[in-house]
């Protein structure tokens, strides 16, 4: 398994809109070959970022997604810069132990 964690610092006034954008496009990523799951984690600690976890069968499946037309469509209308309190950070991981 291959997991991508996208840590996104969202301003408090923009959190509802941020979440709604994911709700509106639910299902798009589900159709991608090699997609396993996605979780959107809302921070409960002040100043912490949202974390978007996507799980893929392998790195190739994730790379195919980010080069797909569906990916381009889902990212074509981003929130304005003031919606964020910092820069997103992407982490990529291979699962070595799972219980």
Image: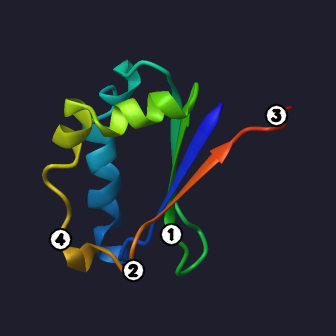
Q: Which numbered disc flags the more N-terminal residue, 4 or 1?
A: 1
Query: Mark 1: few, some, or many residues within 10 Å (few <14, many ≥20)?
Result: many
In this view, 41 is above or below 82: above
Q: Quadrant of the N terminus?
A: top right
Q: Are marks 4 and 1 in contact (CB under 8 Å)?
A: no
Residue drawn at the location 42% of the way across and 68% of the way down = 88
**Residue at the (19%, 59%) spot, across then down:** 78
Q: What residue is pinned by disc 1?
A: 49
Report the residue marked by disc 3. Answer: 98
Q: Position of residue 49 (x, y in %)?
A: 50, 69
- Gap in angstroms between the C-alphas marked 2 and 1: 9 Å
CA distance separating discs 4 and 3? 38 Å
Decide: marks 3, 2 in contact (CB < 8 A)?
A: no
Relative to 44, is 33 on the left or the right?
left
Give percent across and percent down for residue 69. Answer: 19, 32
- The residue that mark 4 highlights is 80
Query: Measured from the top left, where is residue 47 in percent x and y?
Result: 52, 81
Among all residues in the image, which is located at the extreme left? 77
């Amino acid at each position: 398994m291959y997991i991508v964690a996208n840590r996104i610092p969202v301003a408090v006034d923009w959190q509802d809109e941020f979440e709604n954008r994911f709700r509106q496009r639910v299902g798009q990523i589900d159709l991608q070959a090699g997609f396993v799951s996605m979780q959107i984690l809302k921070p409960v600690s002040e100043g912490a970022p949202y974390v978007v976890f996507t799980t893929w069968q392998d790195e190739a499946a994730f790379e195919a997604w980010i080069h797909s037309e569906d990916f381009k469509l889902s990212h074509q209308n981003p929130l304005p810069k003031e919606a964020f309190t910092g820069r997103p950070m992407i982490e990529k991981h291979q699962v070595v132990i799972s219980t």
